[in-house]
Amino acid sequence: MVCSATLRRALVAASLVVVSALPVSAVSATNGASDGRVDLLQMPGQAFRKRNPISVRAVTALNIIMRTENIEDPTYLTMRKNVSDLVAAQLSLDAAQLHKAWSRAPRDHQIAVLTALTQLGVRYVAGKESPYVQVDCSGLLWLSWRAAGVDMPRQAVSQMDPRMRVERNKAVAGDIVGEGTHVHIYLGVGRAMVHAPFNGKSVRLKTMSEEQYERVVWANPSNIATYRL
């Protein structure tokens, strides 16, 4: 028998990956057209495939890890490395170092990172946490960690609860990086993050400045949050 927790995780994953399972397009002949033209019928999956390649591959990796407890699954590791290699290339990071950093992170942290990456390009709107539509900074953290099974606070200030704080040298991929009322998800190496910036911009990858790196605080949501899956 499959345990109920695994089934619930599968349902969460399905909400993230269903569009990617659909065909890119379908071809339909025109009604009695004599010039041989055909119409391309746009399928729901096509719009998703036009998103950031990192997001598309992150969905594929999530589809695997949300259905298994085994973070050493060879297929998952291959899919996850596809994601980390693209992230490393975009941020000029060492790909091998990033892959190792993600491997060191617990399963819930890996899920949080991958979920955040599925939202690249989603527009910032204050007070929102709608996947693939609109999110704010704490909404991105909230939905990413809920996908990982952690029911943490929704507001940025509460997400930086002192009881969740960790030392910078102990931070791992998926931990929260906080500054005032703005929060980010740490990518596990150097100063690399994912965040939803203010002023209507979109979710993106970011490298913190050295000055910012020195003043931010770090938190691990799984320190006090309640697991719901």
Image (tube, grey):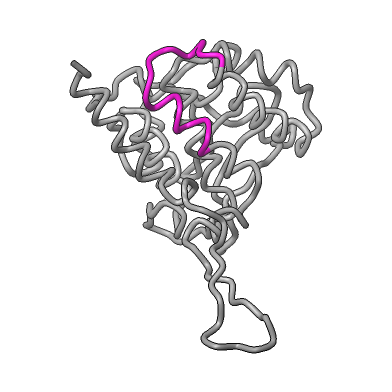
Left-right relation of 186 to 37: left
Of residues 103 and 65, which is closer to you in this image?
65
Residue 138 occupies quadrant: top left
Residue 207 occupies quadrant: top right
The answer to if 87 sits in the magenta stretch is: no
Q: Position of residue 133 (x, y in %)?
A: 45, 59
Q: Position of residue 75 (x, y in %)?
A: 55, 20
Of residues 117 and 73, which is closer to you in this image?
73
Residue in the image at 52% along x and 53% along y:
23
Left-right relation of 162 to 124: left
Work out which quarter of the rendered image holds the C terminus and state it. Answer: top left
Using the image, determine if residue 142 lies above or below residue 120: above
> Total number of numbered labels?
0
Work out which quarter of the rendered image holds the N terminus and state it. Answer: top left
Residue in the image at 51% along x and 10% along y:
72
Residue in the image at 67% along x and 22% along y:
189
Residue 96 occupies quadrant: top right
Q: Position of residue 137 (x, y in %)?
A: 48, 47
Residue in the image at 20% along x and 18% along y:
3
Left-right relation of 207 to 225: right
Q: Position of residue 66 (x, y in %)?
A: 39, 27
The answer to if 67 sits in the magenta stretch is: yes
Of residues 214 and 196, which is closer to you in this image?
196
Magenta stretch: give its range: 59-74
Of residues 172 and 15, which is closer to you in this image?
15
Left-right relation of 170 to 161: right
